[in-house]
Image: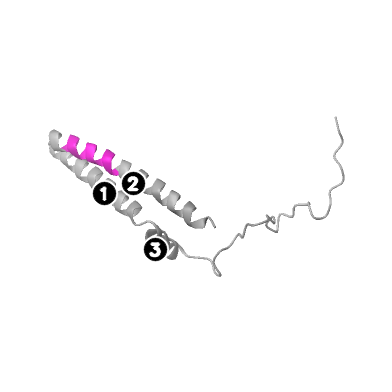
């Protein structure tokens, strides 16, 4: 078994400092964002994801309401609508990822 070599000062890890990685900037923005600012920025970047989430929640809520009232046919329709809305949301996330990666390329 090989013995480990001496640790150079550049390679040592200090828990109080972030590691330095070439080409990576840990903060893109000058000041840290709050939740509201981050949410608004993300919605502007990809507005279809919140729309899909809202459609999913609406279909689920209405489907559960119909199930509670005994309207089984409408409840089944809403559960199928919920699945379609979830698929739309996943597709919107994937499209947003592709668009973001295409923008970041030089």
Instruction: From the image, tell me which residue sits under label 2.
Output: 89
Q: Is mark 2 on a helix, strand or loop?
A: helix
Identify the colour scheme used: one colour
Label 1 or label 2, whichever lies nearer to me, is 2
Secondary structure under the numbered disc 1 in the rendered image: helix
Task: Give the mark, 1 or 2, whose residue is nearer the N terminus.
Answer: 1
Q: Are marks 1 and 2 in contact (CB under 8 Å)?
A: yes
On the picture, is 69 further left or further right than 104? left
Residue 83 image point, x, y percent? 28, 38
How packed mark 2 is, by other alpha carbons closer than 10 Å (few <14, some 14-19, many 20 or more), is: many
Asked which secondary structure carries label 3, the reply is: helix
Q: In which quarter of the image is the N terminus?
A: top right
Residue 83 highlighted magenta (yes or no): yes
Residue 18 position within the rendered picture, expressed as x and y whole percent measured from the top left: 67, 57
Q: Left or right: where does residue 99 sit relative to residue 69?
A: right
Using the rendered view, name the quadrant where residue 10 is placed.
bottom right
Badge 3 is on which residue? 40
Give the label on residue 55, or none: 1
* 59 versus 43 height, above or below: above
Front residue (pair 81, 76): 81
Split into 4 quadrants, where in the image is the C terminus? bottom right
Q: Which residue lies furthest to the bottom in this view?
A: 30
* Chain part drawn in magenta: 75-85
């Amino acid at each position: 078994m090989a013995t480990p070599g001496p640790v150079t000062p550049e390679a040592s890890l200090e828990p109080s400092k972030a590691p330095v990685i070439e080409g990576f900037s840990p903060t893109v923005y000058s000041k840290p964002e709050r939740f509201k600012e981050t949410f608004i920025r993300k919605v502007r970047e990809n507005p279809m994801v919140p729309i899909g989430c809202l459609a999913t929640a609406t279909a689920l809520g209405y489907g559960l309401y119909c199930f509670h009232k005994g309207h089984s046919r409408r409840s089944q329709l809403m559960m199928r609508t919920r699945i379609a809305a979830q698929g739309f949301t996943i597709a919107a996330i994937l499209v947003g990822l592709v668009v973001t990666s295409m923008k970041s390329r030089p």
